[in-house]
Amino acid sequence: MTNPRKKAQIRLSPPEATYFNEIKFSIGNDPLVRVEPLSEMPGGNFRITLHVQGTQKARALATLLVRTKQIGNLRIHVRVKTTEGNVVQPISRALSPREIANFYRVAFRTNRLFNFAVVRASISFTAVYPVFKAQVIQFFNDDLSDLFNNFNRVAAFVFRDVLRNTINRTPILFSTARKKIGSTSYRK
């Protein structure tokens, strides 16, 4: 007699799907950015294409994004195009920390998760701090560690996964905005 219950199938979302969703729900959380579906290239690698409205915004995004993500023996290529379909190349010249911060402002001005970007110098280094809203990016991902199989991560950390962490030896330190807790102060 066969068991009428269906057997549970354990599946995990492939890494290319997770990375695609990280881009879709972070970079794509912008009315001027459209993320095409993930496409498989010959040789088993993948491509993610972003269509960006505005040449300056597209150029800034192309400069800030990780262009090729290596996960094991898998490569995921990220390409930026204008809404007219032209492929946009990143800026290759040396950039100052102030210019990098400005690229964040241009690239993410209309992104719903972005707050601002600043440059801060310490004794030993100067860094760019892009600051994102205190929100969680969540999507279904066959994550067995979550009761509902969701991917859950603070927005700043998702952006850290898909954007360059250094540009011209300038560290990019992804940060979360302060969350206001009413008008009561707990400091005494």
Image (spheres, rainbow, N blue to C red):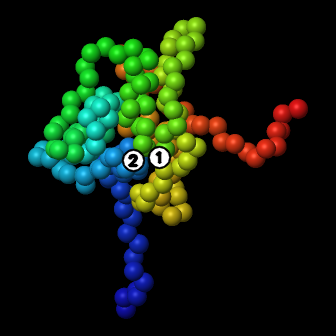
Q: Is residue 133 above or below residue 123?
A: below
68 relative position to 114: left or right: left
Say whether residue 144 is visible. no
Rendering coords of residue 129 (x, y %)? 51, 26
Of callouts 1 and 2, the N-terminal one: 2
Q: Which residue is mark 1?
A: 112
Say whether residue 158 is visible. yes
**Secondary structure of residue under mark 2:** loop
67 relative position to 159: left or right: left
- What residue type is disc 1 on? Arg
Q: Which mark is residue 168?
A: none
31 relative position to 74: left or right: right
- Which residue is at a point 55% across and 17% down the rendered structure image? 120
Q: Is residue 62 above or below residue 127?
A: below
* Residue situated in front as seen by the camera: 86 or 27: 86
Q: Is residue 92 above or below residue 11?
A: above
Q: Are marks 1 and 2 in contact (CB under 8 Å)?
A: yes
Q: Quadrant of the N terminus?
A: bottom left
Rendering coords of residue 57 (x, y %)? 32, 35
* Residue situated in front as seen by the camera: 84 or 27: 84
Q: Which residue is mark 2?
A: 30
- What residue type is disc 2 on? Asp
